[in-house]
Image (tube, rainbow, N blue to C red):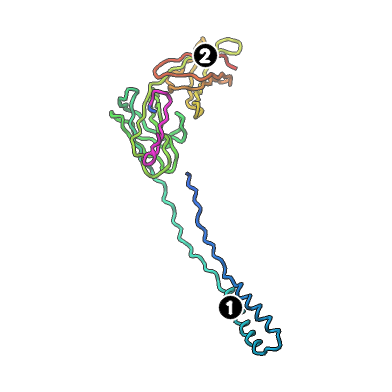
């Protein structure tokens, strides 16, 4: 669904159960042809040939006069200056203005969610630094923000406590008119991801800090997280965005393991079992 300004946004969902020109202008060019003096030159050549006939003195006189008139006409046409176009005053383009965007934030059951911040980012991922941010939603789940009118931006809601994550976002195209509709955003409870990390020798990677990068199948890197393994090499990444992601686990010494697509369900725990670093 696109909401152009007015109504220029597309809802993109991360889980199936969620809410689902450029202008090419050619300026006209005006080609002004020069005066065609072909006819004048033809007559001039005709009378010059008659001048060479000694039998007609009158004809020679008339010819000479006509030649002089032709030369004067040609001279006048050549010396006439071309019209100089009048310079148009430069009118600076109006600076882009901020555009208001209204949002309504709900949970999976459609109930309004308070204390969520509407944000706009330049990229779709869930951790990009916002370029615009609105006030926290009230008890009715409503809020708004103002976004730059000259940028292509992604609008979603953000939980400052990181307990809930937006299950959909809207891409809002540049324009000076606000979206005509209120953008409805669904928040899901965070998921949990557990994994047992082993070294190449099969020993557990115990009591070490490890990082995880969750990658979206379309938008690439989506969410980073960090934790510390326990004595058995177990790592728990609590409260991460639910959805389907490829996951990379990496240690401080750059050993890593890539996991195929993992489905993380909202409010649930997913256990990947033992994995071996390379």
Determine the residue positioned at 36% across, 35% down.
Answer: 134
Please tell me how crowded label 2 is: few (under 14), some (14-19), or many (20+) other residues with Cα within 10 Å. some
Residue 10 lies in the magenta-colored region: yes
- Mark number for residue 143? none
Q: Quick one: which residue is furthest to the front in this view?
A: 55
Determine the residue positioned at 44% across, 56% down.
Answer: 91
Residue 24 is situated, as x and y percent measured from the top left of the image, at 50, 48
Nearest the camera: 188 or 194? 188
Element type at mark 2: loop
In the rendered view, would you say 203 is above or below 157?
A: above
In the rendered view, would you say 14 is above or below 235?
A: below
Foreground tag (1 vs 2)? 1
Residue 278 lies in the magenta-colored region: no
Could you tell me if the residues under marks 1 and 2 are in contact, i.e. CB atoms within 8 Å? no
Element type at mark 1: helix
Numbered range of the magenta stretch? 1-18
- Mark number for residue 73? 1
Nearest the camera: 39 or 204? 39
Residue 152 is situated, as x and y percent measured from the top left of the image, at 45, 39
In the rendered view, would you say 61 is above or below 181?
A: below
Residue 82 is situated, as x and y percent measured from the top left of the image, at 54, 69
Residue designated by label 2: 207
The answer to which image quadrant residue 70 occupies is bottom right
Please tell me how crowded label 1 is: few (under 14), some (14-19), or many (20+) other residues with Cα within 10 Å. some
């Amino acid at each position: 669904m696109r909401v152009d300004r007015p109504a220029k946004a597309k809802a993109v969902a991360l889980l199936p159960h969620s809410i689902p020109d450029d202008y090419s202008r050619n300026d006209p060019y005006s080609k002004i042809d020069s005066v065609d003096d072909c006819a004048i030159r033809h007559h001039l050549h005709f009378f010059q040939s008659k001048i060479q006939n000694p039998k007609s003195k009158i004809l020679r006189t008339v010819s000479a006069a006509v030649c002089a008139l032709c030369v004067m006409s040609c001279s006048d046409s050549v010396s006439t200056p071309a019209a100089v176009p009048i310079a148009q005053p430069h009118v600076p383009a109006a600076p882009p203005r901020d555009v208001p965007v209204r949002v309504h934030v709900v949970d999976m059951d459609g109930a309004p969610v308070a204390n969520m911040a509407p944000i706009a980012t330049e990229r779709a991922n869930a951790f990009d630094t916002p370029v615009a941010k609105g006030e926290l939603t009230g008890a009715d789940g409503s809020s708004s923000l103002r976004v730059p009118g000259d940028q292509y931006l992604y609008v979603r809601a953000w939980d400052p406590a990181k307990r809930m994550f937006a299950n959909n976002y809207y891409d809002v195209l540049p324009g000076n008119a606000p979206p005509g509709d209120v953008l409805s955003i669904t928040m899901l409870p965070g998921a949990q991801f557990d994994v047992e990390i082993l070294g190449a020798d099969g020993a557990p990677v115990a009591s070490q800090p490890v990082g995880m990068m969750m990658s979206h199948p379309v938008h690439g890197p989506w969410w980073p997280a960090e934790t510390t393994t326990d004595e058995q090499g177990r790592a728990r990444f609590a409260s991460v965005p639910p959805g389907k992601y490829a996951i990379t686990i990496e240690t401080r010494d750059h050993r890593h393991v890539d996991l195929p697509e993992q489905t993380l369900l909202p409010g649930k725990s997913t256990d990947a079992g033992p994995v071996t670093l390379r």
